[in-house]
């Protein structure tokens, strides 16, 4: 698979996780591509931690709702509210997150492990961007789905145990990469789907954690 | 009800002494009292503690040089920050590494709730967010408790000497209405400081903001400043 196709492939598979009316928070980068691939008839309520419940498409300069001083997203880009959406303050908004009112959050990882622990907010001594809303989302969303490239520069990101400081423990339900889909249960990782472009041995070599293979293993392409 | 005093941004900034703790509403500068911040930069008031989601932006939406409190960081006027994300202001990391800035990062929902607690008379917040993470070592984390088999962190309430709100419309009684995503942390910060200054784009007559649409109540606001219109 070409490098440029990988993100779209992962986003497309993530889109299958969603059903009509789901409240979804999308992390920056790859997750924001997911709405492009939604099946017909599936409309989401996009939750934005900056203060939108029901975010809309990104407005362009000249659009009536282009308002870079008053309606932005958590990356600082211009945002919009969808028809039927609303604005919300941060305390109420994070009450919704912690309270389990968000069906799913999709986010990337620096490391994720076999116990469902996630590290994605700090590399000590190097980068200190901060956790923003990630810790709240991982703890509070009903489903926490990691979507990312399987390795970083050839190094596994899926580990037996995270080495970096955690974002949250025992929070990840599912990991979706260009190679496979892992579900996380009490016993660890179980591969439920794989991309037939890769062999099981290649997936094992790229994964630094033990995993089981589901009896009902399917192709990611269907 | 009484009308609230209207100050210029410069007069408001002069009220803030060195060493003050300021709750700054705003998210990446949206909903921030940017005109008052500009005046604070001119005054050079030092040793400030800023409580804000982030340190705003070094470049504004239209290419403005500095957008919000990033300029206070740039100008070395800040000794401590409590924030959730500082990835867009690399100077924060530099000053932390140089040992001139104390940085306390806490989860975004915890920041909102700690400030809410500070303004709502609560002794702290019990949240599951941050368990098993570096937050357990934060000076804002007072301990850990197990309730019904689940772990929670006890987070300290946060209050400020001043709160600077960035609102859209403010009426003469201090009632505020926020446009779009300006609301963010402003509504809780309005309750959690000794002196609350609402910077708005438009001062409007009482009644123009419908009672159902008041986001920050005038009773919480001490002074009003009319800032730039965008």
Image (cartoon, coloured by chain):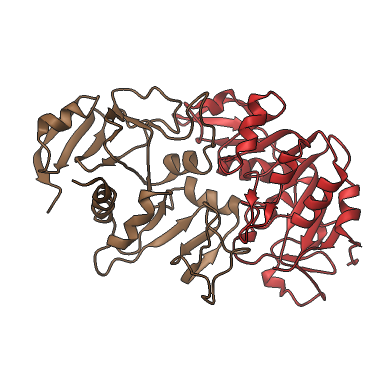
Chain colours: A brown, B red
The answer to whether residue A142 is left or right of residue B65 is left
For the point 54% across and 77% down, the residue is A64
Give the image location of residue A81, x and y in percent: 50, 67
The answer to whether any part of residue A103 appears in the image is no
Name the quarter where the N terminus of chain B is drawn.
bottom right
The answer to whether residue B222 is left or right of residue B96 is right
Residue B175 higher or lower than A186, as above or below: below
Say which quarter of the image contains residue A162. Answer: top left
Q: Nearer the viewer, residue A48 or A208?
A: A208
The answer to whether residue A203 is left or right of residue A12 is left
The answer to whether residue A64 is left or right of residue B41 is left
For the point 49% across and 27% down, the residue is B133
For the point 27% across and 61% down, the residue is A37
Say which quarter of the image contains residue B135. Answer: top right
Give the image location of residue A66, x and y in percent: 55, 70
- Report the number of numbered marks: 0
Give the image location of residue B3, x and y in percent: 90, 67
Name the quarter where the C terminus of chain B is drawn.
bottom right
The answer to whether any part of residue B32 appears in the image is yes
Q: Nearer the viewer, residue B182 or A59?
A: A59
For the point 83% across and 36% down, the residue is B46
Give the image location of residue B115, x and y in percent: 68, 43
């Amino acid at each position: 698979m070409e490098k440029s196709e990988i993100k779209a492939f992962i986003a497309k598979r993530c889109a299958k996780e969603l059903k009509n009316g789901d409240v979804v928070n999308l992390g920056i980068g790859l997750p924001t591509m997911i709405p492009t691939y939604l099946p017909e008839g599936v409309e989401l309520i996009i939750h934005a931690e900056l203060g939108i419940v029901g975010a809309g498409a990104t407005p362009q300069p000249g659009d009536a709702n282009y308002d870079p001083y008053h309606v932005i997203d958590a990356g600082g880009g211009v945002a919009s509210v969808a028809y039927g959406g609303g604005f919300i303050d941060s305390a109420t908004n994070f009450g919704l997150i912690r309270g389990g009112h968000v069906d799913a959050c999709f986010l990337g990882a620096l490391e994720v492990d076999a116990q469902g622990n996630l590290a994605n907010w700090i590399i000590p001594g190097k980068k200190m961007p901060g956790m923003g809303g990630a810790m709240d989302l991982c703890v509070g969303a009903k489903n926490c789905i990691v979507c990312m490239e399987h390795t970083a520069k050839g190094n596994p990101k899926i580990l037996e145990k995270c080495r970096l400081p955690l974002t949250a423990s025992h929070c990840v339900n599912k990991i979706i990469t260009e190679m496979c889909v892992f579900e996380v249960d009490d016993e660890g990782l179980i591969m439920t789907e794989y991309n037939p472009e890769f062999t099981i041995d290649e997936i094992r070599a790229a994964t630094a954690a033990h995993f089981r293979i589901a009896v009902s293993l399917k192709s990611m392409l269907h | 009800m009484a009308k609230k005093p209207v100050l210029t941004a410069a007069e408001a900034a002069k009220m803030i002494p060195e060493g003050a703790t300021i709750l700054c509403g705003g998210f990446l500068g949206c909903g921030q009292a940017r005109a008052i911040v500009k005046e604070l930069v001119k005054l050079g008031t030092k040793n400030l503690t800023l409580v804000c989601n982030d340190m705003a932006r070094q470049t504004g939406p239209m290419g403005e040089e500095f957008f919000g409190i990033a300029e206070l960081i740039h100008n070395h006027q800040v000794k401590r920050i409590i924030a959730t994300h500082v990835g867009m202001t690399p100077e924060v990391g530099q000053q932390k590494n140089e040992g001139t800035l104390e940085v306390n990062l806490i989860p975004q929902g915890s920041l909102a709730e700690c400030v809410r607690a500070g303004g709502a008379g609560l002794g702290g917040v019990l949240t599951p967010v941050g368990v098993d993470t570096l937050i357990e070592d934060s000076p804002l984390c007072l301990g850990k408790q197990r309730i019904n088999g689940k772990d929670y962190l006890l987070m300290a309430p946060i209050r400020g000497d001043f709160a600077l709100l960035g609102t859209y419309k403010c009426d003469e009684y201090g009632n505020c209405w926020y446009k779009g995503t300006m609301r963010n942390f402003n509504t809780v910060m309005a309750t959690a400081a000794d002196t609350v200054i609402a910077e708005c784009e438009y001062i409007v007559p009482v009644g123009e903001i419908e009672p159902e649409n008041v986001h920050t109540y005038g009773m919480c606001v001490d002074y009003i400043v009319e800032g730039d219109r965008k």
